Image (cartoon, grey):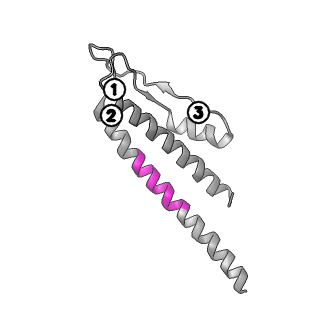
Amino acid sequence: MLNPIADSLERYMDLVSTRQKLVAANIANAGTPGYKAKDLDFQFEFQSAISGSNLNVVEVPGLKAGNDGNNVSLDRESRLLAENAIRFNLASTMWKSQLRMTRSAIQEGRNG
């Protein structure tokens, strides 16, 4: 890895990607009777990812279920999609910045 910051950004982006898949699955199952929305505690999981722990996906507590037992809230899932996009874009921008700094250092080393 390039450095500890880049390593953390990579783990962060992996976590955002995993959450995006969970949100997409929740949306895809919005009409599935008995389906329970799944998510992860983002802050906790990020700290765990940095320390090397495994990811813990859980059913989302406290969501109201419909008559069919499904508790997916499209409003909630849409908000999570937008939040994830912001998180991923920020991490991607930071990753690109780290890469540019590394390239610059390499090029200066070759020219100096």
Q: Horizontally, is 51 left or right of 19 in the view?
A: right
Estimate the x, y position of residue 9 in percent, counting from the top left.
58, 53
Image mark for residue 72: 1
Q: Give the residues drawn in magenta, as a range.
A: 84-95
Q: Is residue 29 magenta?
A: no
Give neighbour class at mark 3: few <14, some 14-19, many 20+ (Cα, 10 Å): some
- Residue that appears at 37% across and 42% down: 81
- Cβ atoms under marks 1 and 3 closer than 8 Å: no
* Amino acid, disc 3: Leu
- Read off the residue under disc 3: 55
Circle 2: element type: helix
Estimate the x, y position of residue 95 in percent, counting from the top left.
55, 60
Circle 3: element type: loop
Q: Quadrant of the N terminus?
A: bottom right
* Amino acid, disc 1: Val
Q: CA distance from mark 1 to mark 3?
A: 21 Å
In the image, residue 104 sits, relative to residue 35, either above or below, namely: below
Q: Horizontally, is 45 left or right of 61 in the view?
A: right
Image mark for residue 91: none
- Read off the residue under disc 2: 76
Estimate the x, y position of residue 109 in percent, counting from the top left.
72, 80
In the image, residue 96 sits, relative to residue 23, either above or below, namely: below
* Amino acid, disc 2: Arg
Estimate the x, y position of residue 8 in percent, counting from the top left.
61, 51
Main secondary structure of the magenta stretch: helix
- Cβ atoms under marks 2 and 1 closer than 8 Å: yes
- Cβ atoms under marks 3 and 2 closer than 8 Å: no
Residue 61 in which image quadrant: top left
Q: Is residue 87 magenta?
A: yes
In the image, residue 19 sits, relative to residue 101, either above or below, namely: above
